[in-house]
Image (tube, rainbow, N blue to C red):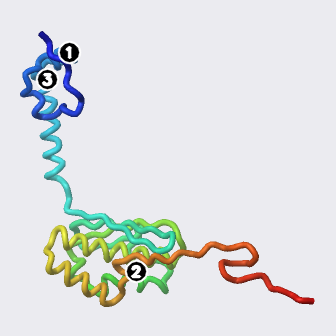
Amino acid sequence: MVKPLLPHKYLGLGYLQTPCAASIFSSFSLPLRFGASLLASAASTAETLKMSAVESVQCFGRKKTAVAVAFCKRGAGHVKINGVPIDLVQPDILRFKAREPLLLLGLHRFSNVDIRVRVKGGGHTAQIYAIRQAIAKAIVAFYQKYVDEQSKKEIKDILVRYDRTLLVADPRRCEPKKFGGRGARARFQKSYR
């Protein structure tokens, strides 16, 4: 007597030890050993991927409509924004703002990590503020995950003491325009004669 097929959710490594495994693989016209080898190769592939995984974290920063995503991993201390080193970021006048997390924490904390930042949306200033927030959040997350809680707490305290928006997003948004005026609050001029 052939047992009915089990539901899909039962397909897994323990599935081959069930009494009806032979009947299931024969109904798929696959030999039992072929199914076992497939599962074994999948498990070894997952193991290889786990071993080759790089120590990395991904964080985002926001300001108005600008969004910056920072990818932080072990490396040699390179910080790039849209493929450009942080020292060449435009506009020049806002470059110092983008470098604030590095200057506050000291370059020794960034010497063993590489940070790649992708930013889009918003204007020049909003993008710079999103970048600095993404870098600050990424270094805090990296230290929490891969270094230790004490140094993460030190970093976080330094950043929050200087400027809270380095770690917490600014919720302010542009207020919508209303009728009867040229902006959100301004009204059209009124004349009596």
On the rendered structure, is 116 left or right of 14?
A: right
Question: Foreground residue, 2 or 99?
Answer: 2
User: Where on the picture, by quarter, is residue 167?
Assistant: bottom left
| Foreground: disc 3 or disc 2 | 3
Look at 6% across and 28% down and name the residue there. Answer: 17
Q: Residues within 10 Å of mark 3 (few under 14, many from 20)?
A: few
On the rendered structure, is 65 left or right of 144?
A: right
Q: Amino acid at mark 1?
A: Ser
Q: Amino acid at mark 2?
A: Ala
Callouts 1 and 3 close, C-beta under 8 Å: no
Residue 129 horizontal/vertical position (percent):
44, 78
Residue identified by numbered label 1: 27
Q: Tell me which label, 3 or 2, sits earlier in the chain.
A: 3
On the rendered structure, is 140 left or right of 96?
A: left
User: Where on the picture, by quarter, is residue 40?
Assistant: top left
Question: Foreground residue, 189 or 146?
Answer: 189
Q: CA distance from mark 1 to mark 2?
A: 62 Å
